[in-house]
Image: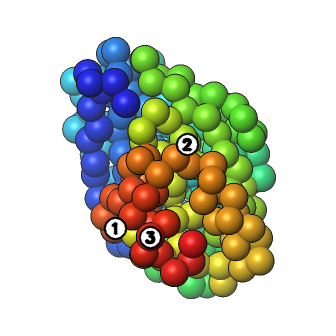
Amino acid sequence: MKSETTIRQFVVGHIQTNCYALISAGECLVVDPGASGALIAQHLADVRVTQVVATHRHHDHVGGVAALLRSVEPRPSFAIGRADADGAQRALELSSHVFDVSDGSLENAPRADRLLHEGDVVQVGEERFVVLETPGHTEGGIVLLGDGIAFVGDTLFAGSCGRTDLVGGDPLVMMQTLERLKTAIPPETMLLCGHGEATTMEHELATNPWL
């Protein structure tokens, strides 16, 4: 990560989702606005939000996308993993049997402007992130791997990993994804997780039982 790059963190929604805003060279990338999109936009009024990316389709990661896009001019683009795009537009319905999604700050995601695939690049200012497809928590989960940092969504947590018992989850696929990440993400990389505290790949390799 470049020295002039900054990251702001917002904890949003009833499941305490981490939303991140990475600011580089006058541009801002928002990752996982899971609720309160209009309020997030207010906190970013001093920067130019150009892109919004969701790491996966669950309501607590896309529930604020629509409001955020409506609140920013010019409208940013919205991107999500290709296999999660349709589900993101039905996020509340798909989660309603497990979670209370009646919070008025939650909406289904709009149609994505960009479908992300393995190896795609998300560029914001001087920062460059490579897309890793990481199914297991959902069918189309992704990780954004940059220089020294990675937005890992709910694929990997400090000491744990994403649950696989929701619609679209698969424990075997999750284990295959985690095995791959052991070598795909450099040890010194800071992991910005979808919930809880940040960690490093080195620490997780040494302590996380799922790895």
- In this orientation, does residue 153 appear? yes
The residue positioned 69% from the left and 31% from the top of the image is 120
Q: Amino acid at mark 1?
A: Gly
Residue under label 1 = 196
Q: Earlier in the sequence, mark 1 or mark 3?
A: 1
Which amino acid, mark 2? Leu
| Residue 36: image location, x then y, percent | 35, 53
Residue found at x 51% / y 57%? 153
Question: For the residues marked 1 and 3, what is the alpha-carbon distance in whole angstroms?
Answer: 19 Å
What residue would you read off at disc 2? 144
Count up the numbered dots: 3
User: Tags 1 and 2 in contact by the CB under 8 Å rule?
Assistant: no
Label 3 sits on a secondary structure element that is helix
First in sequence: mark 2 vs mark 3: 2
Mark whose residue sits in front, 1 or 3: 3
128 vs 126: above or below: below
Query: On the picture, is 173 further left or further right than 126?
Result: right
Q: Residue furthest front?
A: 206
Q: Residues within 10 Å of mark 3 (few under 14, many from 20)?
A: few
User: Between 129 and 80, which is closer to the camera in this rendering?
Assistant: 129
User: Which comes before the other along the chain, label 1 or label 2?
Assistant: 2
Image quadrant for the C terminus?
A: bottom right
The percent position of residue 27, horizontal first and vertical second, equals 38, 20
Residue at 40% from the left image edge and 69% from the top image edge: 158
Please tell me the numbered disc located at residue 206. Answer: 3
Q: Are marks 2 and 3 in contact (CB under 8 Å)?
A: no
Left or right position of 98 against 17: right
| Image position, residue 101 (x, y; %) | 48, 73
Mark 2 or 3: the one toward you? 3
Q: Is residue 157 visible?
A: no
